[in-house]
Image (cartoon, rainbow, N blue to C red):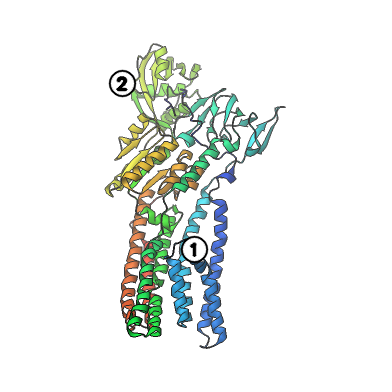
Amino acid sequence: MTQATTSHQHGEKHENACHTHHGGCSCGCSHDHSLLSAKEEGKAWYKEGDFYEIACGGVLFLLALFLPRGDIFRLCCFFAAYLILGHEVLLAATKNICHGHIFDENFLMSIATFGAFALGDYSEGVGIMLFFRIGEFFEEQAVGKSRREIRSLLDLRPDTATLLDEQGNERKIAAKEIKIGQHIIVKAGERIPLDGKIVSGTTYLDTSPLTGEAVPRRASAGDVALSGCINGQGTIELCVEKELSNSTVSRIIRAVEEASEQKPAIERFIARFARYYTPFVVFCALFLAIVPSLLSSKWWENIYISLNFLIISCPCALVLSVPLAFFSGLGLASKKGILIKSGAVLDGLSKVKAVAFDKTGTLTTGIFGVTNFKSCQKDEQEVLLLGASLENASNHPIAKSIVAYTKAQGYSLLPASDVQEIAGLGICGTVKNHKIHCGSYRFLQQEGILEKPFEENAIYIAIDKNLSGFITLGDSLKDDCQSVLKALKSGSLFLAMLTGDGQEGAQKISSQLPLDMVKASLLPEEKLVALKDIRAQKGAVLFVGDGINDAPVLASADVGGAIGAGADAAIEAADIVFMSSRLTAVNTAFTIAHSTRQTARENVILALGVKGAVLLLGAFGFASLWAAVFADTGVALLCILNSMRILYKKDLAPSR
């Protein structure tokens, strides 16, 4: 897009709104945006079903344990418990085998439990499946909690628009029913629901949800207004130019969906482990069954040892404690105001090598206002007071920022008279018997006061036709931004800023930060290209943003993080939602991710160490099933206690 310059406080921002690339949200199609809602409602039912299955299977399992051996009812209880607990695992294993994916945790659970049943050790077979389902349930519960909280963050978005019919009557109808050529009314403070051209009314559009630009854009009859922008002043009438299905909001959602499809898959920790562990133990079991039998002809004895080996190898401790480690990590993150959508995302975050940030609303406050004031006269207070007193006669957003800044300094404003506001240039009038001019350098240039600007993005103040000072406008860094980026940099992470803002504003912000790369004036698809370049050079990338225009890149990043106060589309597209706008939350998330991954590794090493010793004894026929159960259950308990430590970590920076 053509980068707008603030030609003046009332300066018209001559910017091309990028009709074909920028997208809006919150425009009357809540069902189209809902990337989580329908799926997650199904997930909620699924998790409740899981609980009842585990509870029912667990009760039958315990009942069978207290029944005498040889009782037919005992056998029925074991089989019923096994089918209730294991039907999804068996189905998943079968489907994966049909698709050529044999060696996963589902296959290992299936073959180990079949082996236990073949040996007549029904309690072991059902117990293995029970442990597995409990471990999976813990992780799913943590994920579900995060997703429910994410949904609670999403604002209720308008699904209607105010239609102006031929008789001049206003009525609310569904945005999807509005056709091209029809007229709609958008009042002050409302979000524009559909792309259109302004027919009547003058306003200042807040385009920050689309472009990230903090400076409001003046718009009047004949100008295009895109869905997603906020009408900042007065009531405007729009002639709709695009139906909902082809508006910017629909295009941005399609871009998010396409980016999601191209997103690198993040494997779960246990799935990666099972890929190597499962074939190893299966081939070892086959070796124990076949090779010794060929030498000794003791087939049944060696098959028994082989099946025993398979049961011992079943990683009950792992399938319970590894998900529990991630459950604890997700729980701690949630307590810190960081909502992570899955354990795989938490695991993926620990492997991130680069972090890319949006600028406005992410690294900066996103609040347009005064960043600096310089006086050309000795009486600095007098210059600011006179300029702000004149600006107080204007309703322009920039004028309001100057007035708010001056009042914050403790000044009481003076009355202004003979005020004339020149649209797109500036304002002049009389304050305290002085002729005051405020506006862009072009305005003062026309008045013969200023030849060239000191700064492009500034409001100049002249008293009695003498240049007296200027006010710099823009966005400011968040108070914790520098410390957070320094901490990330010390962790050997590559840091980049990808923004749709102009080069001048981006350079001003980046000069204060330890960034390795800065790219400005980027359209959403150009951000995607930049992200792919960083991934190709550095590895997995975390992108942190908050605007609607960030949604596609959030969906495409290895891990996408949305600032909780940001746009709904960004929250829905992201893998992580930082409920606080403070960047300290990013550091906290990294700390939790690395701690969780380290705990999971500790659990694996502990479980495999003990398991390896028992397997070695079992291979030579010296380990009974009870020894295996003792080793597995004991290790599982230790791993659980180790995992729970995550919840009580104190050395984390607060994210709120």
Between disc 2 and disc 1, whose residue precedes? 1
User: How far apart are labels 2 and 1 at the CA level?
Assistant: 83 Å
Disc 2 marks a residue whose amino acid type is Lys
The foreground one among 556 and 288 is 288
The foreground one among 575 and 93 is 93
Q: Is residue 597 above or below residue 637?
A: above
Seen in the image, is 605 located left or right of residue 105? Answer: left
Residue 552 is at least partly visible in this image: yes
Image position, residue 591 (x, y; %): 34, 54
Which residue is label 1 attached to? 98
Q: Residue at x 55, y 54 (%)?
A: 39
Image position, residue 606 (x, y; %): 32, 70
Extreme-right residue of the structure: 167
Residue 464 is at least partly visible in this image: no
The foreground one among 205 and 411 is 205
Image position, residue 364 (x, y; %): 39, 38
Q: Is residue 610 above or below residue 237?
A: below
The foreground one among 468 and 15 is 15
Disc 1 marks a residue whose amino acid type is Cys
The quarter of the displayed image where residue 56 is located: bottom right
Q: Residue at x 51, y 48 (%)?
A: 153
Image position, residue 122 (x, y; %): 48, 80
Q: Secondary structure at mark 1?
A: helix
Picture quarter with the N terminus: top left
Viewer-side label of 2, 1? 1
Extreme-top residue of the structure: 448
| Neighbours of disc 2 within 10 Å: few (<14), some (14-19), many (20+) | few
Q: Is residue 152 above or below residue 181?
A: below
Which residue is label 2 attached to? 378
Residue 304: which disc?
none
Q: Secondary structure at mark 2?
A: loop
Seen in the image, is 532 located left or right of residue 256? Answer: left
